[in-house]
Image (cartoon, rainbow, N blue to C red):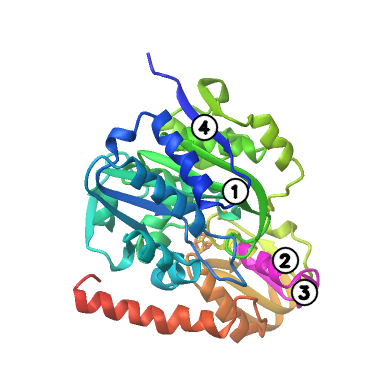
């Protein structure tokens, strides 16, 4: 008989590294994992993006990792070599995002290795159950280690049906080309494929402050004051979905993971432990709006027309994410966007507009078109940074992410990262 999976919920009111250390140490002991804390340990946080002004809540906080690493050192059973490995969002250099997140302080304090996955030695894993990916290439330290820890940030994310926790973290294993490949209506299958490569031994989730309600990079943090710990990523995510009042059966990547045998979707089959009840946490989250909706239902001053396919994880989702950057960081403009008509997907019908923007390589209008100005942004899907730049160049719309320091990160420092990889033979 399968033993009941356990998830531990703990009250952690502030980002005090000492408190976090104690809580995670107790979690490691409760799960009977203390004997495994030796050798090469890889920690995978969420650093999809970090920026003190524009993306202050998108990443696993330094204080949280400080507590986690201190707990590992306190529980060590032998030599310990800790690596923090991550690939940040597409088209950005991870080393810069580590810096914005404050991770170099961790390196100095704990003598750990910070590893941008794109600059690492690589391993290719052939998948047995993959439906989108038959193989995946990622950092050696993700594949070859003695103990793999995931440290996600609990977030809402409109690209993955409003929800991002442990399973979604696996997108950060991929290098940009593989990451963007089929990042469309197939995104949920991609996420589940990656469980064959990234299946953590232990998960400790930063939910002291959760990141909710807008764009996954720029949305605001909300205090929740908890840490979630588990050993099964699906079961962990089922509990996190309930924390956000979501039904796991309606989150496709959780449902698909269940169908592929990674665990149950039923709360009844999960043993909840810790010092705070799920119901009490749900009281704290009951008024949160996650922002997940269809992009053509957004009321923002633009007319948005969608055709087929509707790609929640692709063009439609990424354009919604682009719009949410204004909601998060330029709220005055949010309801008064310049009156462009935007078409995404293959639309059957006539379109008459003053200014027309078509987004997505496959997108087209199968009908009569009348427009004074016509523009197109290609990509399947275009990256966030492409939308930021091309909407400025083609439509004159200045996104909040259009900042000199981020332009330097996204182009100059990205080039330096590419150069380092070239020199080390790790392209
Ligand atoms: S181009 Fe866009 S809408 Fe078309 S399949 Fe790709 S992600 Fe979907």
Vertical relation: 128 (above or below) 107: above
**Residue at 53% over, 55% down:** 313
- CA separation, marks 1 and 4? 14 Å
Residue at mark 3 to residue at mark 1: CA–CA distance:
30 Å
Q: CA distance from mark 2 to mark 3?
A: 8 Å
> Residue 182, position in %: x, y?
43, 57
- The answer to whether residue 159 is visible is yes
Asked which secondary structure carries label 3, the reply is helix
Which numbered marker is on residue 333? 3
Q: Which mark is residue 8?
A: 4
Question: Who's the residue at 56% across and 80% down the image?
Answer: 389
Which region shows up in magenta?
A: 321-346
Residue labelled with disc 2? 327
Query: How many angstroms separate mark 2 from mark 4 (CA)?
Result: 34 Å
Residue at x-position 64% and y-position 29%: 277
Give coordinates of residue 255: x percent, y percent: 51, 35
Is tag 1's residue or tag 4's residue first in the polypeptide sequence?
4
Could you give the CA–CA distance between mark 2 and mark 1, rounded to whole angstroms? Answer: 23 Å
Q: What is the x, y in percent for residue 334? A: 76, 69
């Amino acid at each position: 008989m399968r033993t009941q999976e356990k998830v531990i919920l703990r009250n952690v009111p502030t980002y005090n590294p000492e408190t976090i250390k104690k809580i995670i140490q107790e979690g490691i002991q409760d799960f009977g994992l203390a004997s495994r804390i030796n050798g090469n340990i890889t920690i995978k946080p969420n650093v999809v993006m970090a920026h003190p002004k524009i993306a202050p809540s998108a990443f696993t906080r330094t204080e949280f990792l400080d507590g986690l690493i201190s707990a590992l050192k306190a529980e060590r059973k032998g030599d310990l070599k800790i690596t923090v490995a991550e690939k940040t969002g597409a088209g950005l250099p991870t080393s810069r995002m580590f810096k914005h997140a404050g991770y170099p302080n961790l390196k100095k304090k704990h003598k750990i290795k910070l590893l941008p996955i794109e600059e690492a030695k690589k391993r290719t894993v052939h998948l047995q159950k993959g439906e989108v990916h038959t193989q995946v290439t990622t950092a050696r330290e993700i594949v070859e280690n003695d103990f793999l820890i995931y440290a996600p940030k609990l977030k809402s994310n409109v690209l993955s049906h409003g929800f991002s926790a442990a399973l979604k973290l696996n997108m950060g294993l991929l290098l940009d080309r593989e990451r963007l490949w089929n990042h469309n209506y197939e995104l949920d299958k991609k996420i589940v494929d990656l469980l064959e490569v990234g299946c953590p031994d232990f998960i400790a989730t930063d939910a002291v402050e959760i990141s909710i309600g807008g764009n996954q990079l720029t949305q605001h943090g909300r205090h929740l004051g908890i840490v979630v710990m588990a050993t099964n990523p699906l079961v962990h995510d089922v509990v996190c979905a309930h924390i956000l009042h979501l039904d796991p059966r309606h989150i496709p990547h959780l449902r698909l993971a269940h169908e592929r045998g990674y665990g149950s979707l039923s709360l009844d089959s999960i043993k909840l432990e810790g010092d705070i009840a799920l119901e009490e946490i749900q009281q704290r989250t009951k008024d949160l709006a996650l922002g997940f909706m269809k992009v053509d239902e957004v009321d923002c001053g633009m007319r948005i027309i969608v055709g087929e396919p509707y790609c929640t994880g692709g063009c439609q989702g990424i354009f919604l994410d682009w719009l949410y950057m204004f909601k998060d960081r330029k709220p005055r403009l949010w309801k008064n966007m310049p009156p462009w008509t935007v078409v995404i997907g293959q639309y059957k019908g006539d379109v008459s507009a003053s200014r027309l923007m078509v987004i997505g390589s496959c997108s087209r209008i199968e009908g009569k078109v009348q427009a004074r100005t016509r523009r197109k942004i290609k990509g399947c899907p275009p990256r966030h940074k492409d939308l930021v730049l091309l909407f400025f160049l083609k439509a004159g719309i200045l996104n909040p992410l259009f900042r000199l320091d981020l332009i330097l990160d996204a182009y100059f420092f990205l080039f330096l990262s590419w150069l380092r990889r070239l020199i080390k033979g790790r392209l």
